[in-house]
Image (tube, grey):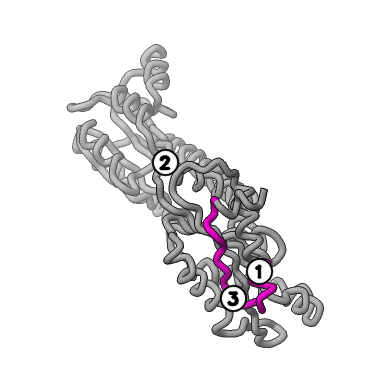
Amino acid sequence: MKTELELSGPNPGPRPPLDSVLIAEDDPIFRHILQSWLQRWNYRVTAVGNGLDAWHALQAKDAPKMAVLDWIMPGMDGIELCRKIRHAQGPYRYLLLLTAKDNKQDVVAGLEAGADDYLTKPFDVDELRARVRAGKRILDLQDALLHAHDALQFEAAHDPLTSLWNRGAIMDALKRELQRQQRSKEPLGIMMADLDHFKKINDSHGHLVGDEVLREAARRLAAAVRSYDAVGRYGGEEFLILMPGCDRTHLPVLGERLRQSLADRPIPTAEGEIPVTLSIGAVCVSPGPSPHSYDDFLRVADTALYSAKANGRNRVQIALAAKAAAQGSG
C-alpha cells in the first residue's frame, strides 16, 4: 500500500492542465507531500499552514474551487472553516476534509459542517487521487450546468438573428426605466427606428441577404449607442432604443448618430454592398411621475416614426413633449 509519505512512483506522463486546489495543512511535511502529489497530477496548488490563511485565500479573485482542509489547524480548524465557507456568498467550493479521526460520529460531524468528502490519515495516495478526481467531476458538472443556465437565459432574452434584446426583454427594460425615472426624476429618451424599404431588399436579394442586412444594422446600432443605453429588436426590421438621462437637447444628436451609422456606408452582403437608411421617431419622457403607461409613450414614438417616413425617410423626427402628446393621443 502506498502511503502519504511515499513520493516515488511511475511517471504519469503529460496531462492537460486542471483546476487549482487549495491545501490547508499545518504540518509542513504533510503539506509538502500533498502539494507534490497534486502538482504531479498537474493541479495548480495554493498551500497555506492554517485555517485563517485558507479563509483569506478563498476570498481572493479566481480562488481555487477545491480545497483540501486539515481537521485540526491553528487559527481556524477544518470544521469551522467548512461552516464559514458554506455560509459565504460566491461560487461553490468542493471541500475535502483530512482527519486522523475515524469515528463515525466525527465523520458525520465533518460532513454536516459542509465537507463534501473526507479522507482519513494516513491515506492511500490512489484514494487521494480518486477523491480529488471525484471532486473535479462535480465541479465540472457544476460549470457545465452554469454555462447551460447562462445560455438559456441569453436565448430567453435575446433575438436569435441579431443578438439584440428581444421584444419581451426590451419591453421589460422600458417598464423598469419608466419606474426608475419616477424615482430619479431624470428624462428618458425613447426611439423607434425602422429600416427604410427593407421589403425591397428581401424581394430583390432574398431573405438570406435580408438577414445579413438586419444583423449588420443591429451591430451598428448597438455600437452607436452609449454603454448604458438599450437596443432591442421590436419586430421585423424595427428597433426600440432606450436612452436613460437623454433630454430633448441630446435626443436629436443621438438620433443622428444612429441614422448616420447606417447611412454613411453601405452594408456588405453576399450579393454585394447594399445602401441602407434608417428612419427614427423619438420622444423624450419628462422627469417626474406620469399618469401614462409605456404604451402611451410607444405610441408617441411610433407616430413620430411614421412622420419621419412620410417626410422622406432617412431622418430623425422628434415628437412633442411626451406628456402632452400622450394626452392628445387618447
Q: Tag 3 or tag 1, which sits nearer the N-term?
A: 1
The outermost residue toward the top is: 105
In the picture, the disc for residue 262 is none
Q: Are marks 2 and 3 in contact (CB under 8 Å)?
A: no
Question: What residue is pinned by disc 2?
Answer: 183
Residue range corresponding to the magenta coloring:
306-323
| Rendered residue at 72%/63% (across/down) | 236
- Where residue 52 appears, as percent x and y from the top left, is 21, 32
On the question of residue 135 being in view, the answer is yes
Q: In front: 172, or 219? A: 172
Q: Find residue 162 and report its horizontal and vertical position in percent.
A: 63, 64
- Find residue 307 and name its label: 1
Q: Is residue 223 left or right of residue 31?
A: right
Element under disc 3: loop
- The amino acid on which the numbered mark 2 sits, given as a three-letter code, is Arg
Separation of marks 1 and 2 at Cα, in angstroms: 32 Å
Left or right: where 212 falls relative to 76: right
Q: Residues within 10 Å of mark 2 (few under 14, many from 20)?
A: few
Q: Secondary structure at mark 2?
A: helix
Amino acid type at mark 3: Arg
Residue that badge 3 annotates: 315
The quarter holding residue 51 reads: top left
Residue at figure coordinates x 56%, y 52% from the top left: 324
User: In this rendering, is residue 44 above or below 312?
Assistant: above
Crowd around label 1: few <14 · some 14–19 · many ≥20 (10 Å): many
Q: Amino acid at mark 1?
A: Ser
